[in-house]
Image: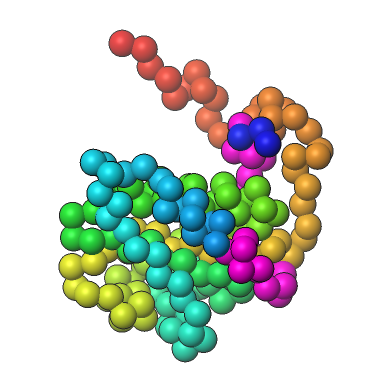
Amino acid sequence: MDTFLNIASRREVRDFAGRPLPDDVVGRILDAGRLAGSAKNRQPWTFVLVESAERRARLAEAVYEPSNVRGAQLVVAIVLDAKGSPFDAGRAAQNMLLAASNEGVGGVPNGAADRAAAHAALGLAEDEQVPVILAFGYPAQERRPRESRPAAEWSARANRKPLTDLVRRV
């Protein structure tokens, strides 16, 4: 596996097929989040799997893009304790998204537009934070990016600012 190719070719998937994810694939995605680094190795997160149809419907109404939650086969809220850093949650989220991509599973991050409604839908305590909600599923339109072009070409074609605009040397 070429990690850089996986990074360069990964795209957000917002339209999911109805095909369920095998338990071993779900396990690998969650384990990738567990393995993320965190400040002082605190591991301040829990991964809340939203499996109840009623809770998922309520959560969909609380996020920025409801259709991502409604169409997904796996919805994971990364929940931090009161001292947890959103940076650490981001590291866990990126690990999960990359692991999913490696398995041919699409993913997309989402956020809570209505914090109180998201907390209620997830059954969280007041002092817990939900910096990111991830939706996963097999893409509705199958993609095979790693087979189509090398990482350097994916990078060159990316709709991103040039590296020269982002790097400052001091």
Q: Quadrant of the N terminus?
A: top right
User: Residue 161: x, y in percent?
Assistant: 53, 30
Is residue 96 in view? yes
In magenta stretch: residue 22: yes
**Is residue 112 or residue 20 the one in the foreground?**
20
Q: Residue at x 81, y 39 (%)?
A: 147
Q: Residue at x 31, y 80 (%)?
A: 123
**Is residue 75 or residue 41 the one in the foreground?**
41
Whether residue 15 is situated above or below residue 96 in the rendered picture? below
**Is residue 84 or residue 40 the one in the foreground?**
40
Whether residue 47 is situated above or below residue 156 in the rendered picture? below
Which residue sits furthest right? Answer: 148
Q: Residue at x 47, y 88 (%)?
A: 54
In magenta stretch: residue 70: no
Q: Is residue 22 left or right of residue 29?
A: right
Q: Quadrant of the C terminus?
A: top left
User: How many numbered marks have been drawn onto this rendered protein structure?
Assistant: 0
Judging from the image, the colouring scheme is rainbow
User: Residue 119: x, y in percent?
Assistant: 30, 75
Whether residue 121 is situated above or below residue 127 in the rendered picture? below
Is residue 64 in view? no
Could you say which quadrant of the image residue 166 lies in?
Answer: top left
Could you say which quadrant of the image residue 115 lies in?
Answer: bottom left
Q: Is residue 124 left or right of residue 138?
A: left
User: Residue 77: x, y in percent?
Assistant: 41, 66
User: Residue 165: x, y in percent?
Assistant: 47, 22
State which region is magenta.
4-26
